[in-house]
Amino acid sequence: MATLRVPAVVPSPSDDCQRLRKAFEGWGTDEKAIIWVLGHRNASQRRLISETYQQLYDQPLVDSLHSELSGDFGKAVIFWTYDPPVRDAILANEALQTKRKGINHLLPIVEIACATSPHHLIAVRQAYCSLYNCSLEEDILSTISSPFRKTLVGLVSPYRYDKEVVNMDVANSEAALLHEAIERKQLDQDSVLWVLGTRNIFQLRATFQCYEQNYGSPVDEDIKSCGKGDLESLLGVIVRCLDCPERHFAEVVRNSIIGLGTDEDSLTRAIITRAEIDLMKVRGEYNNMYNSSLDSALIGDTSGDYKDFLLTLLGAKV
């Protein structure tokens, strides 16, 4: 369930644009007005606002936001304002341009491939081509080394069937296939990637359930037992994203705020990309896993307009 709160009566895109324009004028910026407008509009409404703003003022709304806002708050608002496929294409590109390409840096690509709909993945790939004049697959191949390269291309290239169709014979058979690969520590074989990259989400969850019933432990835990290498870590994240995305994003939020300092990029990504999908479930998982409130954790680790904006997307009254 989404946490985004859209008012029962929504102003016209023209009225919203005028309010935003007024927030940009004068000596200072009215951040509260920006939060009130953009933080209470869904993706289609934000798209209309952006189109109308361009028509009214002959300037992209994102450019105005860039010139008026800065820091973590500015980055969060701008990512929220982008059309979701464009936003995710930019997140994927930023992940690929990072010099250190560890598991955490590549999470945006895994999340796009495994925790969104097949239609959204296609839209992200199309947006990526338009923005960067090459395909997402090409950039993965040219910037990522083994063992990540083959796995990530295998995730973003196929089109998963998106209906709830499950064959329990296939689930048991492919649970056995995964178990054999884990037992032999041959996680890089094509059949493993084919199962994880092409099966519909409901079939995969049935396979993971059969695996645990037949072999006594979750598949991601058995993958972890194969070793502490990059491939084992990547496949574990993939399985968790496919099996229970809300648990994965609860972990992303937790990891972003524990320890010294806050990983604002990861925190922003988790809140913004799930606010219109399942952030309510993420909130529930966070509470179950860590026996604490996600909202309280966010309040304790953020401040100012950045905190208010994230809380707004969480559905809080700021």
Image (cartoon, rainbow, N blue to C red):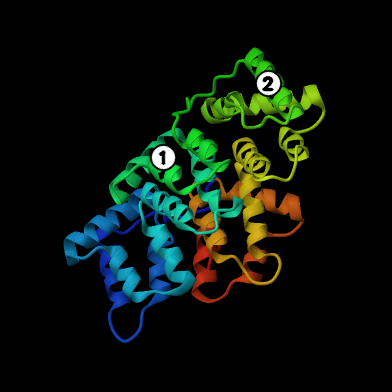
Which numbered disc covers residue 137? 1
Q: How many marks?
A: 2
Instruction: Label 2, secondary structure: give it.
Output: helix
Q: Quadrant of residue 212?
A: top right
* Residue 123 against residue 297 in the figure, above or below: above
Which numbered disc covers residue 230? none
x, y percent for residue 169: 66, 12
- Decide which of tag 2 and tag 1 comes sooner along the chain: 1
Q: Residue at x 63, y 15 (%)?
A: 170
Q: Residue at x 43, y 50 (%)?
A: 88
> Amino acid type of disc 1?
Glu
Q: Quadrant of residue 226?
A: top right
- Left or right: 285 as drawn, with respect to 273: right
> Amino acid type of disc 2?
Leu
* Residue 192 against residue 39 in the figure, above or below: above
* C-alpha gap between disc 2 and disc 1: 27 Å
Q: Residue at x 51, y 26 (%)?
A: 198
Asked if the residues shown at circle 2 and circle 1 are in contact, with their CB atoms under 8 angstroms apart, the answer is no
x, y percent for residue 132: 32, 50
Could you tell me if residue 252 is visible in this image? yes
Q: Residue at x 40, y 49 (%)?
A: 89
Quadrant where the N terminus sits is: top right
- Left or right: 64 as drawn, with respect to 161: left
Instruction: Label 1, secondary structure: give it.
Output: helix
* Residue 136 against residue 166 in the figure, above or below: below
Q: Mark 2 packing: few (<14 Cα in 10 Å), some, or many (20+)?
A: some
- Could you say which is closer to the camera, residue 76 or residue 129? 129
x, y percent for residue 256: 63, 62
Which residue in the structure is indicated by mark 2? 177
